[in-house]
Amino acid sequence: MSLIVSGIKCPPGTGSEETIGHALKLLGISKSRVSDCGIYKVSVDARKRDDIKLVCSVILSLKSPAEEQRLSHRKDCRIFTETEPEIKISPKKADGRTVVTGFGPAGMFCALLLAENGYRPIVIERGADVETRTAAVGKFWNGGELDENSNVQFGEGGAGTFSDGKLTTRIGDPLCRYVLKRLREFGAPDEILYLSKPHIGTDRLRETVKNIRERIISLGGEVRFLCRLDGLKISGGRVIGAITDRGEIPAASLVLAIGHSARDTFKKLLETGVSMEPKPFSIGARIEHTQLEVDYSLYGGGSEEMKLPKGEYQLSHRRPDGRAAYTFCMCPGGEVVCASSEAGGVVTNGMSRYLRDGQNANVAVAVSVSKGDFPPGVLGGMELQRQIEHKAYEMTGSYLAPAQTVGAFLDGKPALRSVIPSYLPGVKECDLNDLFPGFISEMMKEGLRKFSHEMKCFGNMGAVLTAPETRTSSPVRMIRNAAGLADGFENLYPCGEGAGYAGGIMSAAVDGLRTAMSIMSEYGPG
């Protein structure tokens, strides 16, 4: 049990010891009464540019539990207890081993928790290990062939491996801190535990996921790369085997952590009888400004001297009818990359390294897409995504991305680019109004105009839009009950982003943990 002291305001650049000192002074206690202490959270309050502050929380363990209880009644204090997964292992045994399909955050944390509790999960992943995958992606970005099984979407670590490695989430689940601690244990930077907007970076994330894989294998689990799920072997409402392109694997239970881009797998599962429904998602484009522009828009001048973090933001605008435009997955000091996973389709995404030291910043400007916007049927949203991706490919004749300045997109007025587009393999000047359905284009324009009143950089008509960003989230949701079981199945567990129950690294990892907990409550390790 510990005590969290909140609302400590410090000048930028204040060190942890000094911040802890402020907390102790606020409470009126000496450090001799403290058994352990550290920074719990740090955020930047830049609402007043002439008075930018760090807003910090400190976590303290006092030698006297009674004193902790007394201080917890203060408005700026609360008791904190670390949350661990609640493990309840059933005495029942099952024939065979759990098969986990997909080695993104959901599948990875599901397999890790199972392995650490005596289960020996078999993980199948259609893409390659992170080293092989990174080499293949780099080759594709520089003019090579697209590998439809191992790319930015598929392979060890999932789609998040080629991203900013952002660890923010809105789910408020107490297991989020557990996920952060485990990521740090496997190689993520220490500050993910206390920054209000933590990130790992694509470079650090690659090493982290490799270390998790090695831990699972050391405990008797298996990770089989380049092994694609092609179907399910079912008997009496139970999955008894995973049918893969490398043969059949017997299964005591099967976890579907397939990611939001496994379109061929969605189709096969639907044909097999897995209940799904279409769900809303978003479509848009990446906008690039220079990082200096972003920092100035947020902080004014002097951000480097004040040792402020690279500027990042989140903006949104919603119409009375519910249609929204918003920024998504901001990548400070990052680059826009080709995230295609199907031949003949262009997809964009953003990526940053740990240091975020690139010249540009990018973010998706996304428009909400509801069920009425795409063709009928469970896979109607998927088909809309595919149509736009294929149209982008037709417009450029390759995996070059259609790009346009903000001024040209908004008003048809040519404007000189104020940034050098970072997208690999490259961009081609196109009219994005011809790429998107009218409802997306118009809402993007409305959003961009609104955002220009909130951040100066959005008023730059020479900023570049690179399109399309279509893989913001899964276009389907697999129906499951409170125990995490797929409708009509006794041992099939859809989880994570592909199943429609998560939206990013953190929520997917937590969903994977809870899926593992459900499995363990049903049967014990063999």
Image (tube, rainbow, N blue to C red):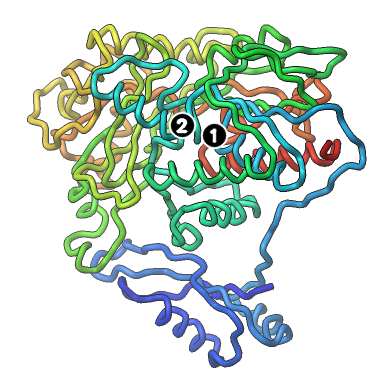
Label ID, residue 104: 1
Disc 1 element: loop
Based on the displayed image, in which of its 4 quarters is residue 482 positioned?
top right
Residue visible at 83% across and 48% down? 88
Residue visible at 45% across and 70% down? 56
Q: Residues within 10 Å of mark 2 (few under 14, many from 20)?
A: many
Determine if residue 443 is in view: no
Q: Which of marks 1 and 2 is nearer the N terminus?
A: 1
Q: Total marks drawn?
A: 2
Cα distance in 3D space between marks 1 and 2: 7 Å
**Image position of 173 (left or right of 339):** right
- The residue lying toward the viewer, choosing from 430 and 491, is 491
- In the image, what residue type sits under mark 1? Gly
Q: Are marks 1 and 2 in contact (CB under 8 Å)?
A: yes
Disc 2: which residue: 159
**Image position of 289 (left or right of 470):** left
Determine if residue 17 is in view: yes
User: Residue 35's x, y, as percent?
Assistant: 61, 83
Residue visible at 64% across and 44% down? 218
User: Residue 441's x, y, as percent?
Assistant: 31, 21
- In the image, what residue type sits under mark 2? Ala
Q: Quadrant of the N terminus?
A: bottom right
**Image position of 206 (left or right of 119):** left
Disc 2 element: helix
